[in-house]
Image (tube, rainbow, N blue to C red):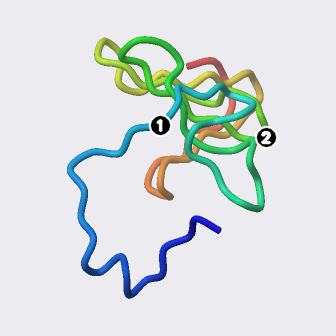
Amino acid sequence: NNHVSESQMENYKVDQIFANNGTASAPSFSFNSDNSTGMYLASTAQLGLSAGGTNMMLINNSNPLAPLISSPATFEAANYLNVSGGTF
């Protein structure tokens, strides 16, 4: 078990966290209950977000938000932006 308790985290600070690149189907940062949903390095300087093993969004320095959405679909960002349907 590699889990750190909340009380241990209060006194533990890091400057950087390193992880393997990951993939859309097996992201580097995922969840115990859903290991095919999370964040991964899609390519150099390109962050990928996946859900259910499918790439949902790429974020890079030339196009910060480039959602990969097929019509009809809904894209929501932190409950502040909701765009439905069409190609973006």
- Which mark, residue 37? none
**Residue 38 falls left or right of residue 14:** right
* Nearer to me, 1 or 35: 1
- Is residue 41 positioned above or below 50 on the image? above
**Tag 1 residue:** 19
Identify the image quadrant of residue 55.
top right
Decide: few, some or many residues near mark 2? Use Cα within 10 Å; few <14, some 14-19, many ≥20: some
* Nearer to me, 22 or 65: 22
**Residue 8 falls left or right of residue 1:** left
**Residue 62 falls left or right of residue 27:** left
The residue located at (27%, 70%) in the rendering is 12
* Nearer to me, 70 or 6: 6
In the rendering, at what x and y percent does residue 60 appear?
37, 19
Determine the secondary structure under disc 1. Answer: loop
**Tag 2 residue:** 52
The quadrant of the rendering that contains the C terminus is top right
- Is residue 47 positioned above or below 80 on the image? above
In the rendering, at what x and y percent does residue 8 appear?
37, 81
> What type is the residue that disc 1 sits on?
Ala
> What type is the residue that disc 2 sits on?
Gly
Q: CA distance from mark 1 to mark 2?
A: 20 Å
Disc nearer the start of the sequence (1/2):
1
The residue located at (77%, 29%) in the rendering is 72
The quadrant of the rendering that contains the N terminus is bottom right
Decide: few, some or many residues near mark 1? Use Cα within 10 Å; few <14, some 14-19, many ≥20: few
In the rendering, at what x and y percent does residue 9 appear?
35, 76
In the image, farthest residue toward the bottom: 7
In the rendering, at what x and y percent does residue 76 appear?
56, 47
The residue located at (55%, 39%) in the rendering is 39
* Nearer to me, 66 or 19: 19
The residue located at (38%, 87%) in the rendering is 7
